[in-house]
């Protein structure tokens, strides 16, 4: 409306101005009729005024037209993404609302399909390739998507790393086929100026149904399906299912409870013995437990990742370190391994926390080993190098957990200050069942010997596994064959000879 008014104003101004000139010319004509002697002069004035009026009219019209063009441009800019020229989120939501209205009037079920298309780990791509090359990737991705869209579909760029697509009249089968085609196209490598980029994408599918009065709800549901696709490893699509909503609600509830648990000291540490080839207790691994009032004991594999999603990993890590430092005071001669998450290492807060807790508990760092996973080393960031060197400089040793399951790259072992590797339990459990397990364990032991690293095997459950490991040359063991993780008092009992290891 405001725009129409603006366009109308110069038109009106032109008409009024030309009208005034015309009236003046009429007046001059009347004067010329009365005073014939002045006619030649008046004729020149009248012609001049007529021409001037015409020029003024033209100028004002031109002004009105360029204002209208500017306004159309402003509207386009406000509703389109500058980089890809696709509709932006505002326009997409507008179209979604229109679609929702037609769904509720027609009462046709799921006549619109909504796709959320997210480029996986796009931030990393920007960091590696730089902004201009990653922009090229986005433009190329937009063009690959556009090439499979129909004229009636709305494809929009709704986030830096994501698109949304709204399609009318599409069966579920056709929607899945479309999503699969999109995954395949988007996952094909990109030729960017800075080098080849390999990017995967996760797609979520939602349907606009009459009962969804809020079209934004369909948007959210498709987004939940994206998270599901990502959880399954990315490079795939997922169709929204109400159970995803329930899972999210449960997770949110658990997050709140974890916050309370931290405040109320409901998190405790258990310690699992580590033994040498003679079966003598030489160390323990600190493993956290959450004793939940209703749900019982919750495993760290559930609440550690949860803590990372809700900003609690720092507090959780701090609690584990403080507790392990305090408990270890009573265990002379035992090395205590503490698990440290990637988030803790990257946050930059690990070293100050260690220093503070060493001082508070008056502990000796040489009695402790920090266990990290290869994921920590993967990004190869300056911060990681700095933190690990500082930790080692304080006197802590570092063990690489779950070795053999990730990249197991020799170069990590050479570049990072690692003292020990822990052979993952999957290799140990396959000993005697799969011939390659022995070969892999032997190869890890040879590698460790060449790099002068210690090796421990975890997940040792049987006598046969323990014996085979010793035959292969691996003398440090941890697992249920010796002991389950036990409370701190259980370790004190073992040290005092009040109890014995199972093996
Ligand atoms: P992890 O560091 O690989 O720990 C070994 C897991 O294997 C432990 O599970 C342990 O109870 C289990 N285990 C020990 N012996 C055996 C065996 O003989 N057979 C089998 N099948 N399993 C065995 P848990 O305690 O559930 O811990 C799971 C993971 O949670 C740990 O894996 C570790 O990554 C993480 N975690 C535990 N405590 C902490 C913590 O304080 N901080 C951080 N960041 N992560 C922790
Ligand atoms: Ca561990
Ligand atoms: Ca492990």
Image (cartoon, grey):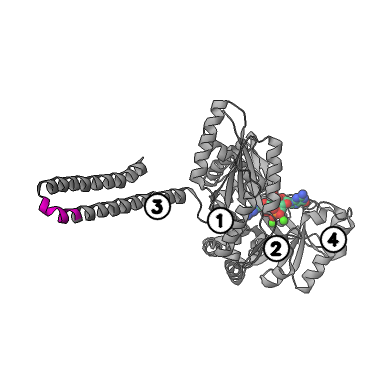
Q: Earlier in the sequence, mark 4 or mark 1?
A: 1
User: Neighbour class for label 2 at 10 Å: few (<14), some, many (≥20)?
Assistant: many
User: Where residue 211 appears, x then y in whole percent?
Assistant: 56, 28
- Helix, strand or loop for disc 2: strand
Q: Earlier in the sequence, mark 3 or mark 4?
A: 3
Q: Which residues are magenta?
A: 36-43
Q: Disc 2 or disc 1, which is closer to the eye?
A: 2
| Disc number placed over residue 70 in the picture, else none | 3
Note whether residue 483 is visible: no
Q: Earlier in the sequence, mark 3 or mark 2?
A: 3
Q: Nearer the viewer, residue 76 or 185?
A: 76
Residue at 68%, 68% (x, y): give it: 418
CB contact under 8 Å: marks 4 and 2: no
User: Neighbour class for label 3 at 10 Å: few (<14), some, many (≥20)?
Assistant: few
Q: Is residue 439 magenta?
A: no
Classified by dominant secondary structure, the portion drawn in magenta counts as: helix
- Helix, strand or loop for disc 4: helix
Query: In which quarter of the view is residue 204 placed?
Result: top right
- Helix, strand or loop for disc 3: helix
CB contact under 8 Å: marks 3 and 1: no
- Whole-angstrom CA distance, mark 3 to mark 1, is 58 Å
- Whole-angstrom CA distance, mark 4 to mark 2, is 19 Å
- Residue linked to disc 4: 469
Mark 3: is the Cβ under 8 angstroms from ligand 1?
A: no
- Whole-angstrom CA distance, mark 3 to mark 4, is 77 Å
- Residue linked to disc 1: 318
């Amino acid at each position: 409306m405001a725009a129409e008014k603006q366009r109308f104003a110069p038109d009106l101004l032109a008409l009024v101005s030309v009208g005034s000139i015309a009236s003046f010319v009429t007046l001059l004509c009347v004067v010329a009729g009365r005073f014939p002697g002045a006619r030649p002069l008046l004729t020149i004035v009248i012609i001049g005024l007529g021409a001037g009026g015409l020029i003024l009219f033209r100028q004002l019209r031109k002004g009105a037209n360029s204002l209208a063009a500017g306004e159309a441009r402003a509207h386009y800019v406000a509703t389109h993404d500058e980089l890809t020229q696709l509709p932006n989120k505002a326009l997409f939501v507008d179209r979604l609302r229109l679609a929702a209205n037609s769904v509720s009037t027609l009462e046709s079920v799921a006549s619109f399909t909504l796709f959320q298309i997210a480029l996986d780990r796009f931030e990393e791509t920007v960091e590696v390739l730089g902004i201009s090359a990653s922009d090229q990737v986005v433009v190329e991705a937009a063009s690959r998507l556009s090439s499979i869209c129909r004229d009636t579909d709305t494809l929009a760029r709704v986030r830096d790393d994501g698109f949304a697509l709204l399609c009318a009249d599409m069966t579920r089968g056709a929607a899945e086929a479309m999503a699969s085609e999109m995954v395949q196209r988007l996952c094909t490598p990109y030729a960017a100026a800075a080098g080849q980029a390999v990017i995967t994408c996760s797609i979520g599918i939602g349907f606009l149904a009459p009962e969804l009065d809020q079209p934004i709800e369909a948007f959210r549901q498709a987004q939940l399906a994206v998270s599901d696709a990502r959880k399954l490893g990315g490079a795939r699509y997922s169709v929204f299912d109400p159970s995803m909503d329930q899972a999210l609600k449960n997770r949110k509830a658990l997050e709140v409870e974890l916050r309370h648990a931290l405040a109320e000291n409901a998190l405790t540490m258990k310690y699992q013995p580590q033994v040498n080839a003679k079966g003598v207790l030489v160390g323990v691994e600190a493993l956290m437990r959450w004793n939940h009032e209703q749900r019982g004991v919750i495993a760290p594999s559930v609440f550690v990742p949860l803590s990372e999603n809700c900003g609690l990993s720092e507090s959780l890590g701090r609690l584990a370190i403080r507790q392990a430092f305090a408990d270890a005071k009573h265990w002379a001669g035992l090395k205590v391994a503490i698990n440290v998450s990637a988030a803790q290492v990257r946050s930059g807060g690990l070293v100050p926390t260690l220093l503070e807790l060493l001082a508070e508990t008056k502990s000796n760092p040489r009695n402790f080993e920090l266990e990290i996973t290869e994921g920590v080393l993967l990004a190869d960031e300056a911060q990681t190098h700095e933190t690990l060197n500082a930790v080692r400089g304080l006197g802590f040793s570092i063990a690489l957990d779950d070795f053999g399951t990730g990249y197991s790259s020799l170069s990590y072992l050479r570049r990072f200050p690692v003292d020990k590797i822990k052979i993952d339990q999957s290799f140990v459990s396959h000993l005697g069942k799969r011939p390659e397990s022995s070969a892999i364990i032997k190869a890890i032991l040879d590698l460790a010997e060449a790099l002068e690293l210690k090796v421990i095997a975890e997940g040792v459950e049987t006598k046969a596994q323990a014996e085979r490991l010793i035959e292969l040359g691996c003398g440090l063991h941890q697992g249920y064959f010796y002991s389950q993780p036990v409370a701190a008092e259980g370790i004190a009992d073992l040290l005092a000879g009040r109890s014995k290891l199972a093996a």
